[in-house]
Amino acid sequence: MMRKALMFALAMTALACVAGVSHAQVYFMYPGAPPVPGDQPAVGANIGIGDDVFRLLGYTRFNINEVSDLGIELVLDNGSSGFGGDSWRVGAGGDYKYMIVPQDNQLPFDLAVGGGFGFQTGGDVTNFNILGGGLVSRPLEMNNGKIVVPYGGLYLIYSHTSFDNALVSTSDNDLDVEVRGGASISFSETLRGYITLHIGSNFMAFFGLNVAL
């Protein structure tokens, strides 16, 4: 009887741990709807701060054609383990973006759709995500010649999280809607800075730099 009670308590604690990390999405959509130029693949890095998590993320992005591109991301997280302490998690992901409508006289912004996937693992927890949604953006030229690009997106995110160790094994599935918005600014022809907010089942703010090679 005592063993069953202990196993039940461990299972409930593990489930709480799973729920605490099930929304830690890996992928970071490149700011703006248009793809990176064909002759300028991009690399970048950002810092993410959110609900009980601190994130370091690096990425690279390649042009596929005049309307689409592909991104690859690597992630290092430090956040709540679900047991009252901190844990480190590593992850990787990727996303594909396709601009379906460019800005013109009839449409005042660029419109793109995209999908992504990502996984994280650490502290007996593995998290897998799939994302799909849309993104709009519009470049604005300032008086000083710098280009500011406000952008926003709406995404549907499926997450599967599992907790597995020698004592207990459990998993959890979630389907969430997330709103993302922010802006980038050009410091030079090749260097841009940006801030992005992710608002859904949790909150994260990203600050980063992007360099065109």
Image (cartoon, helix red, strand yellow):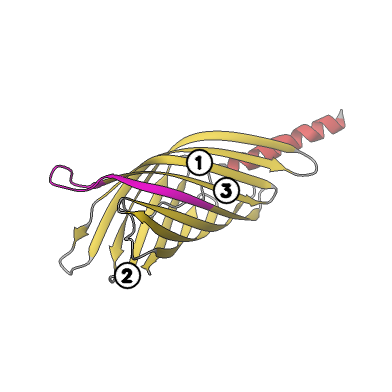
Residue highlighted by disc 2? 190
> Badge 3 local density, few (<14 within 10 Å), some, or many (20+)?
many
* Residue 169 rendering spot, x and y as whole percentages: 73, 38
Relative placement, left or right, of 186 versus 22 is left
Determine whether the residue tagged by mark 1 lies in a helix, strand or loop: strand
Residue highlighted by disc 1? 130
> Badge 2 local density, few (<14 within 10 Å), some, or many (20+)?
few
- The residue positioned 26% from the left and 56% from the top of the image is 149
Residue highlighted by disc 3? 119
Relative placement, left or right, of 43 versus 167 is left
Whether residue 70 is visible: yes
Determine whether the residue tagged by mark 3 lies in a helix, strand or loop: strand
- Cα separation, mark 3 vs mark 1, equals 9 Å
Determine whether the residue tagged by mark 2 lies in a helix, strand or loop: loop
Relative placement, left or right, of 187 versus 211 is left
Q: Tell me the amino acid under the disc marked 1.
A: Ile
- Cα separation, mark 2 vs mark 3, equals 30 Å
Q: Tell me the amino acid under the disc marked 2.
A: Thr
Q: Which residues are magenta?
A: 93-110
